[in-house]
Amino acid sequence: MKRSRTSNAWLREHVNDPYVQRARAEGYRSRASFKLMEIDERDRLIRQGEVVVDLGATPGGWSQVAARRMQGKGRVIALDLLEMESLQGVDFILGDFREPEVLLRLETMLAGDKVGLVLSDMAPNMSGILLSDQARVMHLAELGLEFSRNWLKPDGAFLVKVFQGYGYEDFVREMKRVFKSVSSRKPDASRDRSAELYLLGKGLKA
């Protein structure tokens, strides 16, 4: 079956993407690794000795960065509904974060330990129906925020991928109700045409 012009253009862009080339050269699982590295260099989110939870982790680019920077001091727990190849220093849970039993497995693995950093790069399978896709993106972000509210340490942080559109402003307001500081980040490794950005909440309000 012939590839469409669109998929051929995507493939060309992907192969020529400098972040894809860097990921291959430096042994990272995805170009997304560089998004987290850039944000972490600015905001100092990954701290040795902490628990990091990575939601929507597969193929493991963010977990890989967290594990490397923690150097075995602390824990990284990754979760995704798609299989992920094992990573040294990372515990993986296979399941859909929207399902209560999967959340329970994550909470059981935490064994009462509070979390220093929650990462959420979760995104649903896109249908192409803009309003429906945006609603599902925001639902995943809200689930990540609820988990963070319940499990973060008082000085912990939550980094979440969102797309500007329906529900975005309401979500920002909710973040501001939960965190002392809320800011947005658009790392250089995010493609220019992408509407994605990352919201960063730091320090839980009492």
Image: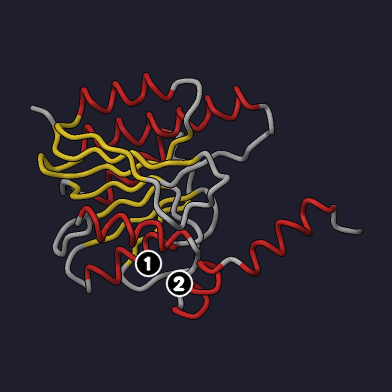
Question: SS for tag 1?
Answer: helix
Q: What percent of the width, then of the height, locates residue 121?
A: 43, 47
Question: SS for tag 2?
Answer: loop
For residue 108, above or below residue 9? above
Give the residue type at disc 2. Answer: Tyr
In terms of image quadrants, where is residue 150?
top left
Q: Quadrant of the C terminus?
A: top left
Alpha carbon of mark 2 to alpha carbon of mark 1: how far? Answer: 7 Å
For residue 180, above or below residue 87? above
Q: Nearer the viewer, mark 2 or mark 1?
A: 2
> What residue does disc 1 label?
64
Q: What percent of the width, then of the height, locates residue 56?
A: 45, 48
Task: Judge from the rendering whether residue 14 lies leftward or rightward of residue 96; answer left or right.
Answer: right
- Dot 2 alpha-carbon crowd within 10 angstroms: few under 14, some 14 to 19, many 20 or more: many
Q: What percent of the width, then of the height, locates residue 12?
A: 71, 64
Task: Judge from the rendering whether residue 51 lies leftward or rightward of residue 89; answer left or right.
Answer: left
- Please tell me which residue lies in front, 81 or 153: 153
> What residue does disc 2 label?
28
Q: Residue at x 27, y 57 (%)?
A: 40
